[in-house]
C-alpha cells in the first residue's frame, strides 16, 4: 500500500471509530481528497429558508431547487421564499429563519455590506452577512419611457443632460426608479447619469420601486426611467411602453450583479450545510449557463411561483438578443447574463471593493469606512473555492482581484487605490 492510500485508510478508520463529522476545508477533507474532489462533511441541518425576488438572475437558486441539486447535497428541506421587494428581503434577513424570516437570499451585492454595518437594518444594529458566491454578471438595463423615444439614448448620451433639464423646466422633475438605495441598480443609474454630465443628487428624483412593479409604474406615467434586472426591461419593450437605453454590460463589461449571501451566524453554526448549499448553487449555475438548457430555464423561471412572466419576456435576453425598442436589435453574446462562464460565479473581492467605494461615494457608507477590512469580513471567497474543489471544478481564479476595471467612459477603478477613483469623480456625496 502506498503512503497516501495508507494515510487515507488510517484516517478514515479513526474518524469512523470516533463517529466524527468531516468538516470541509479541514485537515481531514484535505487528506481524504482526491486531486479532483474533496470530501464534504454531512450537513448539520437539511432545512433552510432562502429568499429570492422575481428576477431572471434568481435562476441559480431556483434551478438548484427544481433540478434537485440541493437535494443531492443532502439539503432536502430548502424552502425558497418569494420576497416582494429588496426591503422585505432586508427585513426578513434581520429576522432570520428561526424568527419567521430567512437565513439567506438571492440579493443585490452591496446589501450584505450595508446589513453588516447596520446601515440599512431596521434596528440600526449590524446584521453580519457573508457572500458565498456571485450569482451572475451582466443582465440588467436602464429603460426609458416612450416619451423619450425621440432621444434614443444609449450608454453614451451627450444630450441626456439637456433632455433632463428640459423635462425639469416643465415643472415635473425627471424621475428615475431604482430597486433599493445603495443597491446595484441605484449605483448603475447614478453612474450612467453622472458619466453623462447629470448630477443624480440634484437633477433627478430617484425613487425606489420593487422590480416586478417597474413596468406597471412606467405604464401609469409615474416615472421616466428605471434601472432593473430582467425580464422587466424586455417586458417594457414587448408592451411598447418604452425602450432600453443601455444594457449594463455596456456600462461595465461582465460587471458583478446579484450574490448568494447568508447570515454569518447561520454559516458559522452550520458550516457543512453552508458548503453543501454552495456546491448545489455552483452546479445550478453551470446548468443554467449551458445553451442546451436555456429554453427549459426560461420555462421554469416563467412559472407563477417564481418570476411570473412569459417565456417571450425571459428567453431572448437570456440568449443575448437585445431588442432595444428603437428599431435596434443586437446579439450581445459577450454581454449577456452569465451564471458561470468567465468566472461569473466567483465573488471577486475587488468587485465588492467597488460596491463599498460607490456606497461611500453616494453617502450610504461613511467616508471613513475601512474598505479592505469590510470586504474581507463579508466576502468568503475561501468557501467558494472549497465548494468548487469539492465539486471537482478546480480552485477558481488565481487571485481574489480581477484587477483594474474600466467603465464605458474610460474611468478606471483600481481596487488597490479606491481613493484615486473617488478623487476623480465630479459628482459625489461623501459623508
Image (spheres, rainbow, N blue to C red):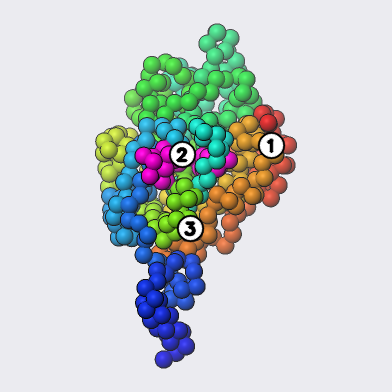
**Residue identifier under label 2:** 94
Tell me: residue 286, above or below residue 144.
Answer: below
Name which of mark 3 and mark 2 comes first in the sequence.
Answer: 2
Tell me: residue 56, above or below residue 280.
Answer: above
Q: Residue at x 53, y 59 (%)?
A: 382
**Residue identifier under label 1:** 367
Mark 1 secondary-structure assignment: loop
Magenta includes 404? Answer: no
Q: Which mark is residue 384?
A: 3
The reply to whether dot 1 and dot 3 touch (C-beta < 8 Å) is: no
Mark nearer the viewer, 3 or 2: 2
Q: Within 10 Å of the Cα at label 3, are there few (<14), some (14-19), or many (20+) other Cα atoms?
A: many
Lateral position of residue 305 relative to residue 232, left or right: left
Image location (x, y in percent) of residue 101: 38, 40
Figure label count: 3
Q: Is residue 294 visible?
A: no
Mark nearer the viewer, 2 or 1: 2
- Camera-side residue: 106 or 185? 106
Image location (x, y in percent) of residue 258: 46, 43
Lateral position of residue 226 relative to residue 405, left or right: left
The reply to whether dot 2 and dot 1 touch (C-beta < 8 Å) is: no
Mark nearer the viewer, 1 or 3: 1
Magenta includes 94? Answer: yes
Name which of mark 2 and mark 1 comes first in the sequence.
Answer: 2
Q: Residue at x 71, y 47 (%)?
A: 417
Q: Quadrant of the N terminus?
A: bottom left
Mark 3 secondary-structure assignment: helix
Q: Residue at x 60, y 25 (%)?
A: 200
The magenta region covers 92-117
Amino acid at each position: 500500500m502506498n503512503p497516501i492510500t495508507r494515510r487515507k485508510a488510517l484516517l478514515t478508520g479513526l474518524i469512523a471509530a470516533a463517529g466524527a463529522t468531516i468538516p470541509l476545508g479541514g485537515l481531514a477533507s484535505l487528506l481524504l481528497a482526491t486531486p479532483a474532489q474533496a470530501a464534504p462533511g454531512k450537513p448539520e441541518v437539511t432545512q433552510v429558508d432562502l429568499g429570492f425576488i422575481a428576477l431572471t438572475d434568481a435562476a441559480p437558486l431556483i434551478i438548484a431547487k427544481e433540478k434537485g441539486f440541493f437535494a443531492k447535497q443532502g439539503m432536502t428541506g430548502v424552502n425558497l421564499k418569494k420576497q416582494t421587494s429588496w426591503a422585505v428581503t432586508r427585513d426578513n434577513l434581520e429576522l432570520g429563519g428561526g424568527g419567521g424570516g430567512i437565513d439567506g437570499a438571492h440579493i443585490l451585492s452591496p446589501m450584505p455590506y450595508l446589513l453588516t454595518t447596520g446601515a440599512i437594518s431596521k434596528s440600526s444594529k449590524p446584521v453580519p452577512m457573508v457572500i458565498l458566491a456571485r450569482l451572475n454578471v451582466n443582465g440588467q438595463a436602464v429603460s426609458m419611457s416612450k416619451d423619450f423615444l425621440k432621444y434614443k439614448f444609449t450608454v453614451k448620451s451627450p444630450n441626456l443632460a439637456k433632455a433632463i433639464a428640459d423635462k425639469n423646466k416643465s415643472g415635473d422633475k425627471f424621475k428615475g426608479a431604482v430597486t433599493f438605495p445603495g443597491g446595484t441598480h441605484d449605483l448603475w443609474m447614478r453612474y450612467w447619469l453622472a458619466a453623462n454630465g447629470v448630477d443624480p443628487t440634484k437633477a433627478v428624483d430617484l425613487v425606489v420601486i420593487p422590480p416586478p412593479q417597474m413596468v406597471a409604474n412606467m405604464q401609469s406615467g409615474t416615472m421616466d426611467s428605471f434601472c432593473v434586472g430582467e425580464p422587466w426591461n424586455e417586458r417594457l419593450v414587448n408592451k411598447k411602453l418604452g425602450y432600453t437605453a443601455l444594457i449594463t454590460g455596456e456600462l461595465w463589461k461582465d460587471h458583478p450583479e446579484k450574490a448568494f449571501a447568508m447570515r454569518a451566524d447561520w454559516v458559522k453554526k452550520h458550516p457543512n450545510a453552508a458548503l453543501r448549499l454552495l456546491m448545489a448553487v455552483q452546479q445550478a449555475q453551470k446548468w443554467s449557463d449551458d445553451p442546451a438548457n436555456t429554453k427549459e430555464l426560461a420555462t421554469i423561471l416563467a412559472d407563477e411561483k417564481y418570476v411570473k412572466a412569459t417565456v417571450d419576456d425571459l428567453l431572448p435576453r437570456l440568449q443575448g438578443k437585445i431588442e432595444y425598442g428603437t428599431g435596434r436589435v443586437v446579439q450581445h453574446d459577450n454581454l449577456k447574463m452569465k451564471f458561470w462562464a468567465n468566472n461569473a460565479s466567483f465573488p471577486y473581492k475587488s468587485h465588492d471593493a467597488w460596491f463599498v467605494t460607490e456606497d461611500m461615494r453616494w453617502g450610504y457608507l461613511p467616508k471613513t469606512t475601512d474598505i479592505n477590512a469590510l470586504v474581507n469580513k463579508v466576502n468568503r471567497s475561501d468557501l467558494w473555492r472549497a465548494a468548487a474543489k469539492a465539486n471537482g471544478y478546480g480552485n477558481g481564479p488565481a487571485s481574489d482581484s480581477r484587477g483594474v476595471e474600466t467603465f464605458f467612459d474610460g474611468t478606471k477603478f483600481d481596487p488597490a487605490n479606491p481613493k484615486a477613483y473617488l478623487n476623480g469623480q465630479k459628482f459625489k456625496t461623501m459623508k
